[in-house]
Amino acid sequence: MSPLVLSLFPGIGLLDQAFEEQGFCVVRGPDLLWGGDIKKFHPPAGRFDGIIGGPPCKAFSSLTHIVRARYGEGAVAENLIPEFERCVAEAQPSWFLMENTPRAPLPRVDGYAVSTCILNNRSFGPAQRRARRFSFGVHGDTAISLLHYVEGIVALENPRVEYAVLAGHQGTGVTLNYSGRRRDGTPYTRSAGTLAKMNHAQRRTIRTNLELQGLPPDLLDHAPFTKQGKFEVVGNGVPLPMGRAIAKAVRAAITGTERTP
């Protein structure tokens, strides 16, 4: 029987797709994108083998302090990791996997031991440089290192480098207008080469971003989203190459399968 997995904050289901390819049966929970509210959701106990999901990461963005300084505390995105933790505590699955930015705090749920690893999409061959933290929790006192089961890390990264596909700034997360300062107060300076790469990233199309995420370029051609909406839903997803590697690692970890040398 296929393991039954609950997906929280599923978005357009990129992490879900990776787990489905590994034989998991994924049930999608509520998401604001589809009119759902995680705060009103209470999963049944003992029904799900595992829970996966990536709470919104804007609360932990490197630009959060700028948003707070410019627009006030009310403009900072809400931290929804506690809602993920609550759902795990209520559902009591055998394991859970939470994906987020490396700056996000680790999930803490009573009765679960948690390990964490940070992976970069470029480590699996694609050009997109995008680092994500994966926190893997299992029932009991002994954590399982998910990194031990991760396969497919390339010896040489792709020589082509692309900025991460993100939800903001037309899907790139970079802006030529931002002029920050270092901790010592001196302004950041950007080389001509860096500015050229950022300018290139800002001209990317939604089809390019889909390809960078490992998806067909025409996937959203007829989707009922605005242009910016398409950039956001694609940017909020886990790149498929990285998602596939982590889904395969979870499958191996819960079955005790040794990694292929």
Image: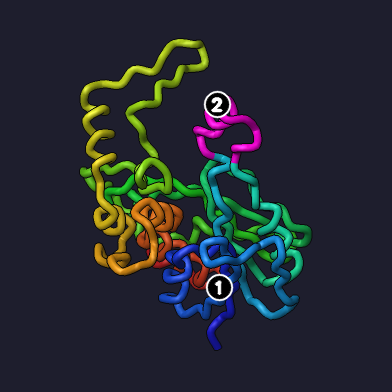
Q: Which mark is residue 28?
A: 1
Q: Residue at x 26, y 28 (%)?
A: 194
**223 or 43: which is nearer to us?**
223
The location of residue 181, given as percent across then percent down, is 46, 17
Q: Is residue 145 depicted above or below 190 in this figure?
A: below
Crowdedness near tag 2: few (<14), some (14–19) or many (≥20) residues, C-alpha within 10 Å: few
Q: Nearer the viewer, mark 2 or mark 1?
A: 2
**25 or 66: which is nearer to us?**
66
What secondary structure is found at the residue carrying circle 1? Answer: strand
Q: Is residue 209 left or right of residue 254?
A: left
Q: Is residue 49 depicted above or below 163 in this figure?
A: below
Query: Residue 12's image quarter?
Result: bottom left
Query: Residue 46's image quarter?
Result: bottom right
Q: Residue at x 35, y 60 (%)?
A: 241
What is the quadrant of the C terminus in the image?
bottom left
Query: Residue 6's image quarter?
Result: bottom right
Q: Is residue 31 left or right of residue 212?
A: right
Q: Is residue 249 depicted above or below 66 in this figure?
A: below
The location of residue 257, given as percent across then percent down, is 50, 72
Residue contact at pointers 2 and 1, CB within 8 angstroms? no
Circle 2 is placed at which residue position? 70
Q: Residue furthest bottom?
A: 1
Q: CA distance from mark 2 to mark 1?
A: 36 Å
Q: Is residue 175 left or right of residue 58?
A: left
What is the quadrant of the N terminus in the image?
bottom right
Taking the magenta stretch, the answer to whether it contains residue 172 is no
Q: Which residues are magenta?
A: 61-76
Crowdedness near tag 1: few (<14), some (14–19) or many (≥20) residues, C-alpha within 10 Å: some
- Amino acid at the residue labelled 1: Arg
